[in-house]
């Protein structure tokens, strides 16, 4: 069985590999989003139930996407092997296998929010190449005159392996071609980003208080559903502001840069962050205040939601009021003195101080539609997350590290606390569940920025637990009760266990 099964399985896998490579090559040359691997992966992400998505983000962090692509590849290989094994006796299995491949890829590509009809072409080509190749390879495995019988394949084995090697070589060359084209295209986007000279802010951020640290761009967390980073061309990028407005606006990247820019230090964090988690960062953002644009468009009475759409089809809903109530809601073009990094939304993203990213920080934005909460549920809300996403007051211990082994004597316990819009009034630390004692707060630029805190501790030998809690500008102290990030953000105190000695 193994001897009989192996050549068929090998033929199936090689043929499918060639088909996928051909599809990816066509997609790379025309529309990268239409490549079957990424399209199927994206469709799987969208169809994944929220708890599983949560688990993947928690367990795998930013490795969730390579993992997903590997799963897609393994499933594909298993199906292809099956088609190859069955196809030796029943050629119909080859046709069905190729059809399944084509329909899955094309269906996934067409299900993408920003899909066009032509997006089915790469998968169609891939299915034809895979099916045709498998058929041809299987004829090499069939001794003349004894089709389908358990006859002496030994004679054909060399010819078959030669043919298989040729196809594998062609598949590898095709895949290399696809990768090369993607590299050149990506390089072009990166170059145009490097060419951009951002104007200075008309309203710059004040100098940072001494001791205050920003998150370097390369260390800033990344959370999004994009399997490949969208690479938008700033020269053709356009933002459309439409819906419940008096006058529709269309703005180019140059139009945005010509407006008076503001620069602000703002903390952004993800609603999916667990207590003590890493999905938070603070940057100096440069952008156009959204209010001025909305004033120009003229918002119709009754519009209470801004739906931001991105190039790859994300929708993020933000309350209209948060663009008008005086906070620094903006269309961001710069991050820490550079054009936005590709991963963080180049060329333009939204940023709404005080809201979690899923509710106010659409990356790669191309459209703002004024509508109502009653009329439209954006992406995350469709999946059960709360329609409005105000940030909850929270705090984190960064030093010592969990399960660290500091030496006995004076130890500095340190971390961050945040409550964007409300600010942080106090941070307290409790050792081994003892009384809460105030930590020292370092100066911070604004209520929209995290506060760095520290607490001197006389550490004695043995195991200890350290807990932190913050009180925000309204006087409300973080509750002890733990709730999960779903559906509107985690609560609970961060506790770290250490062993001194
Ligand atoms: N286009 C797009 N924008 C998006 C998302 C996304 O999946 N796609 N995720 C949002 C979420 S959940 C968060 S927390 C922030 C994260 O921004 P960052 O990756 O720059 O840190 O982006 C928001 N904007
Ligand atoms: Mo998020």
Image (cartoon, rainbow, N blue to C red):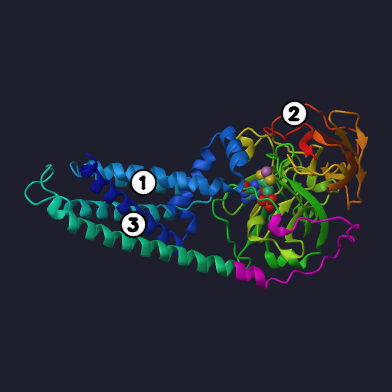
Q: Main secondary structure of the magenta part?
A: loop
Q: Residue furthest left?
A: 145
Secondary structure under badge 1? helix
**Does residue 480 lie above or below 281 as drawn?**
above
* N-terminal-most mark, 2 or 1: 1
- Res. 18 mark: 3
* N-terminal-most mark, 1 or 3: 3
Residue 497 lies in what quarter of the image?
Answer: top right
Q: Magenta part of the protein: which range?
A: 190-219
Answer whether labels 1 and 3 touch (C-beta < 8 Å).
no
Secondary structure under badge 3? helix
Task: State the CA–CA distance, disc 1 to disc 3.
Answer: 12 Å
Badge 1: residue crowd in 10 Å (few <14, some 14–19, many ≥20): many
Which residue is painted at 63% across and 66% down in the image?
A: 234
- Is residue 460 visible from the viewing direction of this image? yes
Residue 23 lies in what quarter of the image?
Answer: bottom left
- Res. 77 mark: 1
Task: State the CA–CA distance, disc 3 to disc 2.
Answer: 50 Å
Q: Which residue is mark 2?
A: 482
Looking at the picture, how far across and down is residue 102, in whole percent? 35, 48
Q: Quadrant of the C terminus?
A: top right
- Is residue 243 visible from the viewing direction of this image? no
């Amino acid at each position: 069985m193994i001897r009989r099964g192996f050549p068929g399985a090998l033929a199936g896998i090689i043929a499918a590999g060639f088909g996928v490579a051909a599809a990816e090559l066509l997609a790379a040359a025309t529309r990268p989003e239409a490549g079957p691997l990424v399209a199927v992966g994206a469709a799987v992400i969208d169809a994944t139930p929220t708890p599983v998505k949560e688990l993947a983000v928690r367990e795998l962090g930013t490795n969730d996407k390579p993992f997903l692509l590997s799963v897609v590849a393994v499933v594909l290989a298993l199906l292809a092997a099956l088609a190859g094994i069955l196809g030796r006796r029943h050629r119909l299995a080859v046709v069905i296998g190729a059809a399944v491949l084509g329909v899955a890829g094309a269906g996934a590509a067409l299900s993408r929010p920003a899909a066009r009809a032509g997006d089915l072409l790469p998968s169609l080509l891939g299915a034809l190449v895979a099916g045709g190749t498998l058929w041809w390879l299987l004829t090499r495995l069939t001794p003349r005159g004894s089709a389908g019988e358990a006859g002496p394949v030994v004679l054909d084995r060399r010819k078959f392996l030669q043919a298989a090697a040729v196809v594998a070589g062609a598949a590898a060359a095709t895949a290399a071609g696809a990768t090369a084209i993607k590299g050149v295209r990506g390089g072009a986007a990166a170059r145009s980003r490097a060419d951009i000279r951002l104007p200075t802010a008309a309203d710059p951020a004040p100098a940072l208080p001494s001791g205050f640290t920003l998150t370097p761009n390369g260390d800033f967390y990344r959370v999004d559903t994009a399997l490949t980073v969208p690479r938008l061309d700033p020269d053709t990028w356009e933002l459309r502001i439409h819906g419940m407005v008096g006058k529709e606006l269309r703005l180019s990247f140059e139009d945005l840069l010509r407006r008076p820019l503001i620069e602000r230090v703002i903390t952004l964090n993800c609603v999916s962050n667990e207590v003590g988690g890493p999905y938070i960062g603070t940057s100096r953002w440069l952008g156009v205040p959204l209010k001025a644009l909305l004033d120009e468009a003229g918002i119709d009475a009754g519009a209470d939601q801004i739906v931001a759409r991105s190039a790859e089809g994300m929708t993020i809903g933000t309350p209209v009021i948060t663009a008008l109530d005086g906070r620094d809601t903006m269309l961001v073009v710069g991050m820490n003195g550079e054009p936005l990094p590709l991963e963080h939304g180049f060329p333009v993203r939204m940023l709404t101080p005080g809201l979690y990213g899923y509710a106010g920080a659409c990356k790669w934005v191309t459209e703002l539609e004024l509508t109502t909460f009653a009329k439209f549920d954006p992406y995350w809300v469709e999946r059960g997350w709360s329609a409005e996403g105000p940030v909850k007051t929270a705090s984190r211990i960064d030093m010592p590290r969990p399960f660290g082994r500091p030496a006995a004597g004076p130890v500095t316990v340190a971390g961050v606390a945040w409550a964007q819009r409300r600010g942080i009034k106090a941070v307290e630390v409790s050792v081994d569940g003892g009384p809460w004692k105030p930590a020292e707060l370092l100066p911070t630029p604004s209520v929209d920025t995290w506060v760095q805190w520290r607490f001197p501790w006389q550490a004695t030998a043995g195991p200890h637990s350290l807990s932190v809690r913050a009180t925000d500008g309204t006087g409300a102290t973080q509750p002890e009760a733990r709730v999960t990030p779903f559906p509107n953000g985690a609560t609970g105190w961060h506790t770290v266990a250490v062993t001194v000695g």
